[in-house]
Each structure stands twice: as C-alpha cells, then as structure tokens.
C-alpha cells in the first residue's frame, strides 16, 4: 500500500476513527480566488473527494459520510443546482468503475424528494453495483438534512406503533438509530469541516452527538490526504470522556 507523506507514521492504526464525517466546504471560494466560476470549484472538489476516499479506504477506515448537497442547497441559483446534480450523477457513474474497483461500498443518504428520476436510478444502480464490496462504506449525503432524517425516522416509528407492531415504551435510542439513513453504522466519531466555517449546517445531527470536531481553514479542493492524516492524529490525541471522568 502506498501512503502519501510522512505524517502517516504518527497514526495509531489500532485506534482509527470508526466513522468520519466530512462537511466539504469552500468550493465556491476556491474558484472565486482563481477568478473561475463556482462550478469549477465544485469540479475540483469532486477530484479532491476521490483522493480522500481512496486514502481513507487504504487506511482501513470503516465508514465515511461526505456532505455533497444539503436540503438547504436548493436555495442556490438553478444553474448551480443543475451543475451540482449533473456532477453528482457523473460521480456516481464513474464511481462504479473507479471506486468500486477499490472495493468501496457506495450509498446515498438523504431524501429522494426533488431528485430527478435519472439520479435516483443511478443511485440504485451504483448502490447495487457496490453492495458486495468489502472496503470502506462511503455515504454520499445527497439532498440530506439532519432534521429531515430525524422527521423521516419519526414517521417510520410512528407508523409501526400505529399499526400495533411496537409499544411506545419500547422506543429507545437504539430503535431510533435503526430508522436513520445510517442504520447499523457506528456513530460519527470524527467530524471534519473545511473552509474555516465552524457550524454543522444540518449535518448528521443525531450521529455527531459525541464526535470530535476538527476544523481547517483550507478550502475543500485544497484538502489533501496529509490533512486527513493530521485530523486523525489530532483525533487520537484527544481525551474522549463520553460524560465520564
Ligand atoms: C461546498 O462548497 C459544496 C456544496 C455546498 C455543494 P460551497 O459551494 O458551499 O463553497 P463556498 O462555501 O461558497 O465557498
Ligand atoms: C454545507 O455547506 C453543505 C455541504 C457542504 C454540502 P454550505 O456551504 O451549504 O453551508 P452554509 O450555508 O455555509 O451553512
Ligand atoms: Mg459553503
């Protein structure tokens, strides 16, 4: 296996984060700095993503969730939304050839509401194509919002209770968790956000409950495997107490 840069030796391979979340932010500013259209930033961001997934998979990370399009991103100009949707469609298509070859399991999490039939079909196809892979599980958060996910789970559970298949007293955090898009996956334990912003922007509100947060001023297209290494090293040097002493 090839690992870029020397930082890698500082990583304790027996104490890797189980689930990394990434809020990939700053594509627009990256393009603006170069006098390019925002779309060029998104395209560069997609290249960055490919490299980071490959690296996380090589490291042996089990799960990674990347924020690609939020339920709030529909507020952007139609032209930008269309560009992003097309980029995601092509990303999913190419992933079948490239990332699947690297054994990556690709899943899309989020609402299907508002997505085109073409993209929904491609999601199904890519998920099916990669479901038996045994490498990293990559969740692409696409038309994803943490609140939408919680409301969605609540509706499912309410329906089960209404049908008399479960008692209210049996609802606990395990049951709730099993109705999220990330059912059966570990909680996010390392959350990375690029571009200097320090907010959640509706990302994985339930799953980041005890996540270590790691921020960098670097814009997403500039985020390199060595930055991922640094985030993991810092994560490993934090004292995680989970409410204890
Ligand atoms: C993140 O980059 C990508 C998406 C939200 C799709 P932005 O497009 O938010 O970039 P900035 O924040 O405007 O620089
Ligand atoms: C969060 O970034 C969404 C994604 C990275 C897909 P935004 O750029 O949309 O977040 P805000 O608007 O700065 O909170
Ligand atoms: Mg942004």
Image: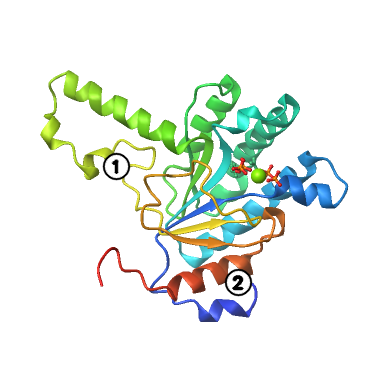
Tell me the quadrant of the picture where the N terminus can be found: bottom right
Relative to 189, 8 lies left or right: right
Q: CA distance from mark 1 to mark 2?
A: 36 Å
As rendered, which of 178 and 50 lies closer to the eye?
Answer: 178
Q: Quadrant of residue 39?
A: top right
Relative to 49, 105 lies left or right: left
Q: Is residue 232 above or below residue 213?
A: below
Q: Residue at x 62, y 62 (%)?
A: 216
Q: Quadrant of residue 210?
A: bottom left
Q: Which residue is mark 1?
A: 177
Q: Residue at x 64, y 28 (%)?
A: 75
Residue 236 in the image, given as x and y percentages of width and height: 44, 73
Say what secondary structure mark 2 lies in.
loop
Q: Is residue 50 above or below residue 128?
A: below
Tell me if mark 2 has few (under 14), some (14-19) or many (20+) residues whose alpha carbon lies within 10 angstroms of its own: few
Tell me the quadrant of the picture where the C terminus can be found: bottom left
Residue 232 in the image, given as x and y percentages of width and height: 50, 69
Q: Which mark is residue 2?
A: 2
Q: Which mark is residue 133?
A: none
Relative to 15, 99 lies left or right: right
Query: Ligand 2, what quadrant?
Result: top right
As rendered, which of 172 and 65 lies closer to the eye?
Answer: 172
As rendered, which of 160 and 74 lies closer to the eye?
Answer: 74
Q: Residue furthest right?
A: 35
Residue 223 in the image, given as x and y percentages of width and height: 66, 60
């Amino acid at each position: 296996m090839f690992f870029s840069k020397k930082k890698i030796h500082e990583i304790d391979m027996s104490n890797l984060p189980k689930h990394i979340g990434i809020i990939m932010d700053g594509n627009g500013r990256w393009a603006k700095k170069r006098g390019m259209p925002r779309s060029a930033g998104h395209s560069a961001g997609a290249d960055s993503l490919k490299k980071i997934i490959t690296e996380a998979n090589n490291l042996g990370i089990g799960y990674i969730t990347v924020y690609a399009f939020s339920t709030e991103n529909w507020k952007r100009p139609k032209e930008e939304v269309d560009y992003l949707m097309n980029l995601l469609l092509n990303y999913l298509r190419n992933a079948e050839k490239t990332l699947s070859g690297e054994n990556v399991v690709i899943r899309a999490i989020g609402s299907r509401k508002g997505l085109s039939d073409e993209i929904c079909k491609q999601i199904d196809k890519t998920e099916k194509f990669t479901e038996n892979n045994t490498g990293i599980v990559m969740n692409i958060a696409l038309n994803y919002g943490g609140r939408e996910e919680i409301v969605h789970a609540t509706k499912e559970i309410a329906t089960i209770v209404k049908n008399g298949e479960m008692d209210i007293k049996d609802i606990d955090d395990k049951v709730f968790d099993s109705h999220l898009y990330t059912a059966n996956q570990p909680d996010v334990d390392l959350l990375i956000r690029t571009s200097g912003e320090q907010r959640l922007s509706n990302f994985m509100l339930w799953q980041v409950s005890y996540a270590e947060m790691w921020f960098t001023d670097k814009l997403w297209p500039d985020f390199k495997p060595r930055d991922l290494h640094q985030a993991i090293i810092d994560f490993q040097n934090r004292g995680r107490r989970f409410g204890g002493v």
